Amino acid sequence: MTQRNTHYGIGIFTLIWLGQLASLVGSGLTSFALSTTVYKTSESVVQYGLVLVSAMLPSVLLSPLAGALVDRWDRRRVMLSSDFIAGLSTLAIALLFRHERATLGLICLTSVITSVCSAFQWPAYSAATTLLVPKEQYGRANGMVQLSQAISYLVAPALAGFLVVRIQVAGVILIDFATFLFAVLTLLLVRIPRPATASEKPESSLRQEIAYGLNYLVSRPGLMAMLGLFAALNALMGFVNTLVAPMILSFATEDVLGTMMSIGGTGMLVGGGIMSIWGGPKRRIKGVLGFLFMTGVFIVIGGLRPSVPLATAAAFGFFFCVPFVGASSQAIWQAKVAPDVQGRVFATRSMIAQLSAPVAMILAGPIADYVFEPLLATHGTLADSVGQIIGTGQGRGIGLMFIAAGILTMLATAGAYRYPRLRLVEDELPDVICDELAEQTLIP
């Protein structure tokens, strides 16, 4: 019976994963089409960054509330509702583009709605995975999640660049709407078990449950240290994510950018595939820190010269490392956090880790446009020094920001390794769920 239930849970997870994979690809199509359209029409890094912030900040701010509610509600219904509402928002922006009424404000508004849905969908998906997959399979399951993201990075940019020319932005977004419907269909076909409540009293108020996530983390220094590391590095990634397209477009065309991003997605596909088969190193913290350090190396390489081959190689290497970092980190959290409180704890974790990224996105445009770009203009202050190494002109100030971000990433990761609570987090914190408990919760 135990073996049958285990296979049952993995099968349910795989079906849900397929629906979320389709939705990720569709969202990638919309993201690429909208962001490049906004940047192309405005030529403003600030407006480009505003669209990115609108798609991220609401999800980050709502995470603690969403996580507490996810632990109270049926996680399948949360995912269903999130996908359905996000799909309607996508349909609305498609119709606005079709009738030529899509303004920057309306684009940001629909992005906010989708972001709110994401605040509920992600902790529900993560917590459901813990219940459906046996503990020894966490690494592989999270590798599959990273693999789905890799497929999105691989397929979406090049496909979006191809489709925008032929069916316009509205047509691309309608494809995204269809993928949301597919994700909803897969969820309608499955059943996700509820966890046995063990760590929280039924009479706890919503405010207490929101605070519980933070208290849970503060009482576990190893997890809090890992969270602090990701918060610091996400600030650097906020700069990188906002500025990568403007930097590449300073020496390449949009179709080249799409191809480069797809090649980068190939790196993530390869890394995610390896991770889903291998499951990661036995000492998962080594997978987190080792591959984080390597991402810093590739960020530096990407900013060195205005070269398509060099930037493409750097993108491939960076995205190759991402699945190992994400899956190893997630496996640690799933093993150390009780299933019945994962919704609120994971949501609090998400807010703390990601809050720095939208702040960086807001600052990236002005800092690039008014500080770093002038420094490396043809006759800028650094043209005769740093400019002799990395070049001068449009995009080179952003390149210098990439180099600085990569170096800081390596230094932060090396410093984190020296902190015993983080380095030994897997030894000092016991696993809070055993295989037998996980299997008992799987009710066909």
Image (cartoon, rainbow, N blue to C red):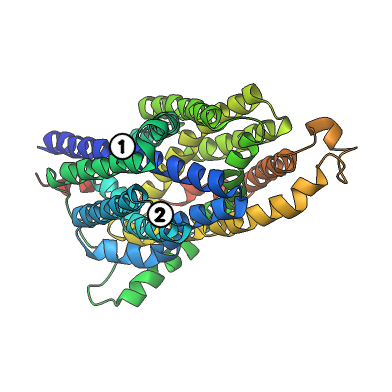
Residue 302, quarter of the rendered image: top right
**Percent x, y for residue 165?**
42, 32
Q: Mark 2 = which residue?
A: 102
Residue type at mark 2 is Ala
x%, y% of residue 67?
34, 62
Query: In the image, residue 315 lies at what x, y percent?
Result: 57, 30
Q: Is residue 41 above or below residue 144?
A: below
Residues tagged 1 and 2 counted as in contact (Cβ below 8 A): no
Q: Nearest the camera: 101 or 226? A: 101
Q: Secondary structure at mark 1?
A: helix
Residue 422 spot, x, y in % from top left: 56, 49
Residue drawn 44% across and 41% down?
33
Looking at the picture, does residue 58 appear above or below residue 22? below
Residue displayed at 46% across by 35% down: 323
Three-letter amino acid code of the residue under disc 1: Leu
Q: CA distance from mark 1 to mark 2?
A: 27 Å
Q: Secondary structure at mark 2?
A: loop
Residue 337 vertical position relative to residue 316 in the rendered view, above or below: below
- For label 1, the residue is 21
